[in-house]
Image (tube, grey):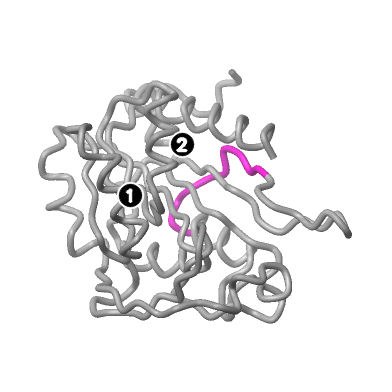
């Protein structure tokens, strides 16, 4: 909803500012909607966007062309290096996972996907190169990969601890075969030291009022700049 997306944006900009984040990795960038939202909200730091699907990447690349702080890569990220087949559909629902029965019932277009083979890399293998031009990087990871967020996160390995914040779309109902549900995803992120800063409904079922997907913003609380200099995290705001 409009209200939910407004609340996500406000809390995101709050976190970026509060944690001194100067580089955002935008994984599953589609046509650059997220990066544009960051710029419209006043974020002036680096953005590194990843989008594997050719048609979307062409638009993304065009939109980033005049922004020297916005780099784009036609690449999928995952837990192994190699290539994967993307099930490509119009809009923002392309995924390397096949649609579930529920997903096909909810979104007709998921049944008519075409296949594109795309390169996939582990993030920990390319992270140093991506951040080389950012002085004292304080990175934030945004994931929106239609069911593969945990695979991308697994590809960070121990480098997850370098990130001061992150964001992932988590589902209670599976749109794709084999995708993790919200409790599993949240447990993995919490195990890596992230804590929830906000959870916002993205989509739900109008007919039954069931919640489908949430956008979750997370932070590494001990990475706040003032905390690093000895101020207690327990101090009430």
For residue 138, above or below residue 162: above
In front here: 217 or 108?
Answer: 108
Residue at point 24%, 79% (across, down):
82
Q: Nearer the viewer, mark 1 or mark 2?
A: 1
Rendered-image quadrant of the N terminus: top right
For residue 15, above or below residue 93: above
Residue at point 25%, 69% (across, down):
121
Q: Taking 110 as reference, is 31 left or right?
A: left
Magenta-highlighted residues? 191-200
Helix or strand or loop: what does disc 2 sit on?
helix
Identify the mark nearer the N-term, 1 or 2: 1
Rendered-image quadrant of the C terminus: top right
Residue at point 53%, 63% (across, down):
93
- Image spot of residue 128 (x, y percent): 15, 52
Q: Main secondary structure of the magenta part?
A: strand
What residue is pinned by disc 1?
59
Residue 64: quarter of image: top left
Residue 104: quarter of image: bottom right
Residue 50: quarter of image: bottom left
In front here: 109 or 163?
Answer: 109
What residue is pinned by disc 2?
221
Q: CA distance from mark 1 to mark 2?
A: 36 Å
In front here: 90 or 194?
Answer: 90
Residue at point 59%, 80% (across, down):
177
Is residue 77 rendered magenta in the image?
no
Q: Residues within 10 Å of mark 2 (few under 14, many from 20)?
A: some
């Amino acid at each position: 909803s409009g209200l939910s997306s407004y609340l996500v944006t406000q809390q995101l900009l709050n976190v970026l500012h509060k944690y001194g984040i100067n580089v955002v990795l935008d994984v599953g960038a589609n046509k650059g909607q997220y990066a544009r939202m960051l710029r419209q909200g006043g974020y002036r730091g680096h953005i590194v966007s990843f989008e594997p699907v050719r048609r979307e990447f062409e638009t993304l690349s065009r939109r980033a062309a005049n922004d020297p702080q916005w780099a784009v890569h036609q690449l999928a990220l995952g837990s192994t290096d190699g290539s994967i087949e993307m099930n490509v559909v119009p809009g923002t629902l392309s995924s390397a996972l096949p649609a579930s029965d529920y997903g096909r019932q909810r979104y007709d277009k998921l049944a008519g996907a075409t296949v594109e083979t795309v390169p996939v890399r582990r993030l920990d293998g390319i992270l140093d190169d991506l951040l080389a031009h950012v002085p004292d990087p304080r990175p934030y990871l945004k994931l929106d990969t239609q069911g593969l967020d945990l695979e991308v996160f697994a590809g960070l390995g121990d480098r997850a601890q370098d990130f001061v914040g992150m964001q992932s779309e988590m589902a209670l109902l599976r749109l794709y075969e084999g995708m993790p549900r919200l409790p599993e995803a949240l447990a993995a992120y919490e195990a890596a030291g992230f804590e929830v800063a906000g959870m916002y409904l993205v989509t739900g079922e109008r007919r039954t009022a069931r919640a489908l997907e949430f956008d979750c913003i997370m932070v590494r609380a001990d990475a706040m700049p003032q905390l690093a200099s000895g101020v207690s995290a327990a101090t009430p705001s």
